[in-house]
Image (cartoon, rainbow, N blue to C red):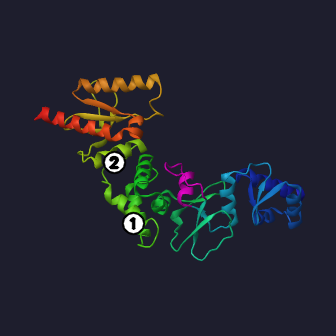
Amino acid sequence: MTQSWRRSMDAWLSTHVGIISSAELVAAGCGPRNVSRMVDSGEIVTMLPGVFRSAQWPCNREQKLAAVCARNSAASIAFTTAGQLWSWRRMTDPLIHVLVPHGVSPEMPEVVVHRCRRIDPVDIVQRADGIRLTSPPRTMFDCADMIGMEATASVLEQLLNERMVTFGTITDTVRRLYHPQRPGSKTILAVIQSRPAWRVALQSDLEFKVLEEMARQRLAMPVTQYAIRPPGYDHDIAIDFAWPGVKLAIEVDHPAWHAGALDSHTDKGRDRKLTTIGWTTSRITDIDVNGGLREAVADVGEILVRLRTAAA
């Protein structure tokens, strides 16, 4: 009998990042006395009341999140903590945020608990390892006020580009959850109202910052991710920002994508090919974005003026 419950316990721990609740131990056939013995011997460690971690597993953030979910079946990892699990940009909040239905009061020290009357099944994603978290649309809605309008707009571009959401999904979520007193409502509404639904999603935070500066300097807004196929080319060239009327292409160099000689060679080849069909290509680097963006975008404005004058 002992071996039987141990096998069940070990199987559970192996698939749930080393976290198990007292309810699961009982279901496996492990009585309270055996639980106490394992705690006393250090075989398992108490994470939260009624939730344990195998001493064979590390105690890091992932284990803490799994323990929170094991502690209360109504709790879901949410806000910026869920954004971190979804690998979103600008999610630097070190706190652990949890969403629970209104009226639920879980005992979870060192956790920020948020209560809401409206949590629908579509808002929750259950991972195989036991961690529950809010869906991408719900997560974005909830943390909009927390990270601010600029960061929310940048995250929206990431989600659209990575196809984690659609523009329709986001607007439907806002319609369903919007309330003047609900955190996130006003910020996310302002973001989606300011974004043209037809615009192709930006691929990076750098591109978003460049586009924002273009708007601040009142440049004519470019077409994003403009696709063009030069004669003799077997694939499209995607231009970060394009003004097709004057054939101006602006590329944003990303340090992770343009770090090697091969990448540099490819970029120069693209620029040369665009030049053969009458396009002017200029590049804004990550160094420009982080230290000289205003001047770089002002230069783009002057190039636009020159090209328009030449075309007149």
Disc 2/disc 1 C-alpha distance (Å):
20 Å
Which residue is denoted by mark 2 in the rendering? 212
Q: Which mark is residue 130?
A: none
Give the quarter of the figure containing the C terminus: top left
- Classify mark 2: residues with Cα within 10 Å, few (<14), some (14-19) or many (20+): some
Tell me residue 230's x, y (percent). Answer: 27, 28
- Tell me which numbered mark, 2 or 1, is placed earlier along the sequence: 1
**Rendered position, 107 above or below 223:** below
For the point 64% across and 74% down, the residue is 105
Left or right placement of residue 126 versus residue 271 in this view: right
For the point 87% across and 58% down, the residue is 38
Identity of the amino acid at label 2? Glu
- Viewer-side residue, 21 vs 296: 296
Q: Residue 170 colored magenta? A: no
Give the quarter of the figure containing the N terminus: bottom right
**Rendered position, 214 above or below 103:** above
| Residue 176 position by quadrant | bottom left
Tell me residue 108's x, y (percent). Answer: 68, 66
Question: Principal SS element in the magenta part?
Answer: loop
Tell me residue 152's x, y (percent). Answer: 43, 55
Left or right placement of residue 111 versus residue 213 in this view: right
Tally the numbered discs.
2
**Residue range corresponding to the magenta coloring:** 78-95
Q: Residue 79 colored magenta? A: yes
For the point 57% across and 72% down, the residue is 101
Q: Which mark is residue 186?
A: 1
Asked if the residues shown at circle 2 and circle 1 are in contact, with their CB atoms under 8 angstroms apart, the answer is no
Residue 225 in view in this figure:
no
Identity of the amino acid at label 1? Lys
Left or right placement of residue 106 versus residue 92 in this view: right
